[in-house]
Amino acid sequence: MNQPMSNLYLVIFPEKLVLKIGKANDIANRLSSLSRHWGEADYKQSYYIELPEPEVYRIEKSLHYLLESHAVTNLEGDGQTELFQFSALEPALQHIKLYLKSKPTPHQIIQGLPQAFLETPTTPKNHPNRRKRRRALQQVNRFHTSMSANLDKINRLQRILIILKYKSHRIAYQHDIINGQIYFRIQDGITNEKFQAMVNLMRCLSYRIEFGTVGVCGINLNTVIQAAEDLVQFVIRIPTEEDNLSKWNYIEPMFSECIRLYEALPSRSKLVHKDLPILD
């Protein structure tokens, strides 16, 4: 027996800087209602997928539970309990894609809502609402561009951690955590070219987020690189409660895999038979 179909949507509302995750049989009608409270949606940056209605219910509820830490609770209006920060978008997409992999028939979440979902009334080119929407969309685009750059850095960091794990018999390294900082030492012959490569590596621990309305903020986890003879030491700061954790919440969902990979590393690689000194 064929099950009724429905839609799971992840829609961005740039004027309020929120992400709405919900279910709708008719997305056009639902967006028409939501826009009266949250402004016009960013159709190009939003996502949807059509699935049997029971599955949409299950995914929607699981996303609301998993993304609770990203929930927006200071706004009132239609669907207010399903509003999240932009930082929830990436983990939400990862969860959906993981679920789709388990299905016997192929499904794909689609970026960009179809033209049929667009509202038909047109707004004059110089109308204040249109200018307001254009500024809001520019803010969203800057946020997504900065987060995409951060994701590229984190992906590179993950690849390096995987290499360190599986090449521990070929790379001499040791790491210790002292006073909230990671002291990571690598034993190798140092050339100017290698040192510059390591400087570039440390840039993978510096992140920039453009919020649009409140400007730019940065998160820097690297403190110093030191070199002595055949030893290079990286000092990496661990985020604490003294940091602005509201900023870190945007990075943490993407960075969590790096933490898992780091914790899986041996404290000393197989080539290190006695402690590598910590440089002052």
Image (tube, grey):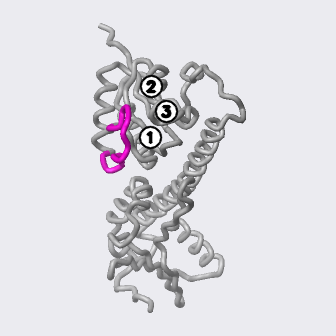
Q: CA distance from mark 1 to mark 3?
A: 11 Å
Residue located farthest toward the right when viewing the structure as drawn: 125
Residue 35, above or below 163: above
Location of mark 2 (residue): 33
Specify the quadrant of the image occupied by residue 174.
bottom left
| Foreground tag (1 vs 3) | 1
Name of the residue lying farthest toward the front: 128
Residue pointed to by mark 3: 47
Closer to viewer: mark 3 or mark 2? 2
* Image location (x, y in percent) of residue 28: 49, 21
What is the secondary structure assignment of the residue under circle 3?
strand
Q: Secondary structure at mark 1?
A: strand
Quadrant of the image for the C terminus?
A: bottom left
The one nearer the camera, 240 or 270, is 240
Q: Amino acid at mark 2?
A: Ser
Q: Give the crowd class for mark 1: few <14, some 14-19, many >=20 residues within 10 Å.
A: many
Q: Is residue 157 left or right of residue 66?
A: right
Give the x, y percent position of residue 98: 38, 37
Q: Residue at x 56, y 82 (%)?
A: 189
Q: Which residue is mark 1?
A: 19
Q: Residue at x 44, y 29 (%)?
A: 34
Does the magenta-highlighted stretch encompass residue 75? yes
Which residue is pictured at 59% across the width and 48% down the height? 139
Task: Give the residue drawn at x 39%, y 22%.
Answer: 24
The stretch of residues the image draws in magenta is 68-81
Check disc 2 and report its element: helix, strand or loop.
Answer: helix
- Mark positioned earlier in the residue sequence (1 or 3): 1
Q: Report if residue 43 is visible in the image.
A: yes
Foreground of the two, 276 or 71: 71
In the rendered image, which quarter contains the N terminus?
top left
